[in-house]
Image (cartoon, rainbow, N blue to C red):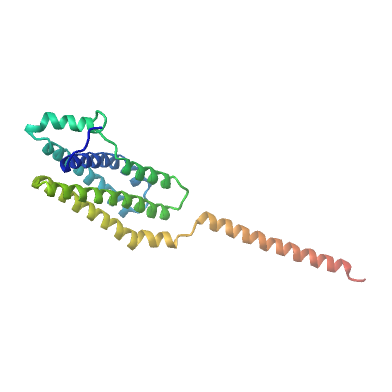
Amino acid sequence: MEKIINLKDLLKYQILDLYSAEEQIIDSLPDMIENARKPELKEALRNHLMVSITHKERLDTIKKVLIDDNEEEEDQGFFSALFGGSNNAESQGVAGLIKEAKKIMGEDMTPEAMDAAIIGAAQKIEHYEIAGYGTVRAYASELQMASVVDELQKTLKEEYEADDLLTKLAIGQVNPDAEATVDSEATVDDEATQQDAVDDDYDRLTNSVSIMSSSDPE
C-alpha cells in the first residue's frame, strides 16, 4: 500500500472508504426493507436508499476534484497503489456492521422486535457515516477545498436527518410496540400448559373422590 504522507492523502483514503461504505449500504438496504414490518420504517429505509445513491454520486464527483489535471498521473497511481493495485476499497467498518445486521435479522423474533432491531442496526451504520463524513469535511476545510466541503456538508446534513427520523420512529412507535408485544406462540403454549395443569388437578381430585367413595363402609 502506498504510504500516506499528508492530509490530502488521508482525505483520499477516507473518501475511498466512504465510497465503499455507500456501495455496501446500497446493497444491504433492500434486505432491511424486506424484513421491516411497519410501513413508516419501510418508507424511511427506501428514502435512505435513494439518498445513498446520491451520496455515492457526490463521492464520484469529489474523487474527480481530488485528481486535478496537474496531478492526474501521480494521483491515479496513488489511488491504485493505496489499496493494493485497485481503485476499489472495502470499508471493513461498514462490512462488519452489515454482517452484524444480517445476523440479528436472521434471529427468531416477533415482527415488532424485528423493526426495533433493524432501526438499531441502521443507526449504527448511520453513526459510522456521520463520523466519516464529519472527518473528511474537516480535512477538506483544512485543505481549503471549498467545493469538496460544500458537497460533504450536503451529505452530512442528510445523514443527520436520516438518523433523526429513525430515532423519532424508534421512540414514538417502534420501541413501544416492541415493549408491549406478547409472543402469540408462547401465549398459546402457556395457555395449553395452564389447561394441562387444570386437567391434572381435576384428575387428581376425581381420583381422590373415587378412592374415598370406595373406602366408605357399606
Residue 174 vs residue 68, the one in the foreground = 68
In the image as oriented, which residue stretches furthest toward the left?
Answer: 70
Q: Is residue 120 left or right of residue 129?
A: right
Q: Residue furthest right?
A: 218
Residue at position x 39%, y 45% from top? 100
* Picture residue at 16% right of the left edge, 47% below the top: 139
Q: Is residue 56 visible?
A: no
Viewer-side residue, 101 vs 179: 101
**Compared with residue 157, is residue 53 higher up or lower down, i.e. above or below?**
above
- Residue 22: x %, y % from top left: 25, 42
In x, y percent, where is residue 110? 45, 53
Query: Can I make out residue 162 in this image?
Result: yes
**Quadrant in which the N terminus appears:** top left
State the residue in front, 6 or 61.
6
Work out which quarter of the rendered image holds the C terminus and state it: bottom right
Q: Is residue 82 left or right of residue 101?
A: left
**In the picture provided, is 134 more to the left or to the right than 209?**
left
In which quarter of the view is residue 69 placed?
A: top left
Instruction: Tell which residue pokes out farthest to the bottom in this image.
Output: 217
- Residue at 18 percent of width and 49 percent of height: 155
Task: Name the spot of residue 33 as percent of width and height, x first.
Answer: 33, 46
x, y (%) of residue 138?
Answer: 17, 50
Q: How many marks?
A: 0
